[in-house]
Amino acid sequence: MKILVTGGSGFIGTNVVEHYVRQGWDVLNIDVKRPKYVEAERYWHACDITDFEALRYVVLDFQPDYIIHLAARTDLEGTTVEDYQANTMGVKNILKVAAQLPALKKILITSSMLVCHTGYQPKDQFDYAPTTRYGESKVITEQYVWQSLPTCDWAILRPTSMWGPWFGIPYRNFFDMVKAGLYFHIGHRSCTKTYGYIENAVYQIHQLLMTPTTDSANKVFYLGDSPAIFIEEWANQIAAELGRRVPCVPFWLVRLAALCGDVLVKMGLRFPMTSFRLKNMTTDNIIDLRNTEAIAPNPPVDRVTGIRRTLAWMEQQG
């Protein structure tokens, strides 16, 4: 089988490419960035998905049986939706090219859980409530898919907070802080969130790719682990593997630091704690994964094993 992965040099993409290479598939990664490790460069073609003609040439030459569209700008630094052309123009281009592949079996389009803000429970797959320009750009991603329905089978993926080997900001920072003894519990205000270990996410992606998803009322699938993670427990589990204990700092003190951070950010300075971040760190965000679990009911890696594999990978990376 031939599989095209856009954004295969990113965190999720790196793990997806690794998976299909191990399975013996013919893999092509198109990305503007080089892969994260040298061995993956043989599967990589430098291509900007906002350049339609370049994208068209590469994809039609490869003639994939399946497409996993992961390429995107994922940071929250953009000030306008136009800053996220990879998410808006990019999905338009990939769908236009996919329409020229009569043998294409399925395409998965990656969106984001941030089409709804933290703590918001969408009523259905068309209920959006973004609070960031990035989230708005992913709403446009989904809306364009619905406006330009692929002729093959398709589904929309909404990854939750992913962690594991090859991750970066912000969840790599979480592990780094626990490892360095710099992480602390915020009083007793810890929250519960739906996170996803990357190997489980790859398993979910593969199951969704291989399983028909033809019901138009069920086209959106979140990627994540169940049950949701109580962050204090997760931090304690990471610390235990490192032979550490996580200290606790009074909430009022962290709140004061966040207010100071707000002032410094307005002055153009970076600070690790702001009111926005504090709210995010103390707000529950539990995602309904039943749609995904119906198709991918047996994630292969438990949390403690995932922690151990992640720490081992971090040790290898230095």
Image (tube, rainbow, N blue to C red):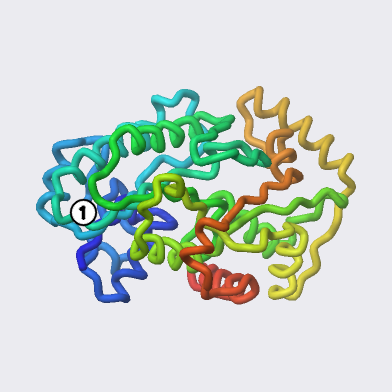
Query: Label 1 sits on what residue type?
Result: His
In this rendering, the answer to whether 39 lies above or below 91 is below
From the viewer's perspective, is 80 left or right of 173?
Answer: left
Depth order, front residue of 179/201: 201
In the picture, the quarter occupied by the N terminus is bottom left
x then y, percent, for residue 212 = 35, 60
Residue 88 image-quadrant placement: top left
Q: Residue at x 43, y 64 (%)?
A: 202
Q: Residue at x 45, y 49 (%)?
A: 218
Observer able to see residue 165: no
x then y, percent, for residue 15 = 40, 64
From the viewer's perspective, is 274 left or right of 48?
Answer: right
From the viewer's perspective, is 306 left or right of 232?
Answer: left
Q: Residue at x 20, y 55 (%)?
A: 104
Depth order, front residue of 150/178: 150
Q: Write down the residue under mark 1.
A: 45
x then y, percent, for residue 261 = 73, 33
For mark 1, give the secondary structure.
Answer: strand
Q: Residue at x 52, y 37 (%)?
A: 115
Depth order, front residue of 199/76: 199
Give the mark count.
Answer: 1
